[in-house]
């Protein structure tokens, strides 16, 4: 099981770095899904992208991987309103495929991401011995 956990940790880390970098290469799309009631859309996009990259890299560093996993848990919960706003308003994001059913499926997938990141908070898998 440990081997699978390491593989899934690496997959999540790579995914978070890629998605986080998209916040810098395609900020306008992400800016559109920040709910209107929040100020400073572009700084929020850059901040969330930076935190995603940071957490993705952190997942691969044994001394901080648990903290990085907790950061992702919190981040997935905090960005949920943006995903909901996107789905309700059918907003297209240039960096992501635009298909309304997929946008709605992304909402329960957010719960899966929370669980996935939480799994890495359970123990520091790089320090576990079998």
Image (tube, rainbow, N blue to C red):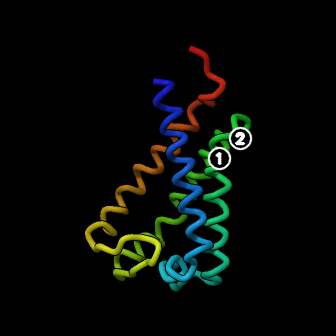
Pick the residue in front: 55 or 7. Answer: 7
Classed neighbour count for the residue bearing mark 1: other residues with Cα under 10 Å, few (<14), some (14–19), many (≥20): many
Q: Position of residue 94 (x, y in %)?
A: 45, 78
Q: Quadrant of the N terminus?
A: top left
Residue matched to label 2? 64
Which mark, by number, is residue 106?
none
Coordinates of residue 38 in the picture (x, y in percent): 58, 81
- The tag on residue 68 is 1
Left or right: 6 as drawn, with respect to 55: left
Residue lying at 45% horizontally and 44% vertically, measured from the top left: 115
Please give the name of the residue rendered at 49% of the width and 83% of the height, measured from the top-left corner. 32
Q: In which image quadrant can residue 50 be found?
A: bottom right
Q: Is residue 79 left or right of residue 39?
A: left
Q: Looking at the image, which residue is at 29% across and 73% down? A: 99
Secondary structure of the residue carrying numbered label 2: loop
Q: Mark 1: which secondary structure?
A: helix
Q: CA distance from mark 2 to mark 1?
A: 6 Å
Nearest the camera: 83 or 98? 98
Is there a contact, CB below 8 Å, between mark 2 and mark 1?
yes
x 56%, y 14%: residue: 130
Q: In terms of depth relative to the viewer, which is nearer, 81 or 120?
A: 120
């Amino acid at each position: 099981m440990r081997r699978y956990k390491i593989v899934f940790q690496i997959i999540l880390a790579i995914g978070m770095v890629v998605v986080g970098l998209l916040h810098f290469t395609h900020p306008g799309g992400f800016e559109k899904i920040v709910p209107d009631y929040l100020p400073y859309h572009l700084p929020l996009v850059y901040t969330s992208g930076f935190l995603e990259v940071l957490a993705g890299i952190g997942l691969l560093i044994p001394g901080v991987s648990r903290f990085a996993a907790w950061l992702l848990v919190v981040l997935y919960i905090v960005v949920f309103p943006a995903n909901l706003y996107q789905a309700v308003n059918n907003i297209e994001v240039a960096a992501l495929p635009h298909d309304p059913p997929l946008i709605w499926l992304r909402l329960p997938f957010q719960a899966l991401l929370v669980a996935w990141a939480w799994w890495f908070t359970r123990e520091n898998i790089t320090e576990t011995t079998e």
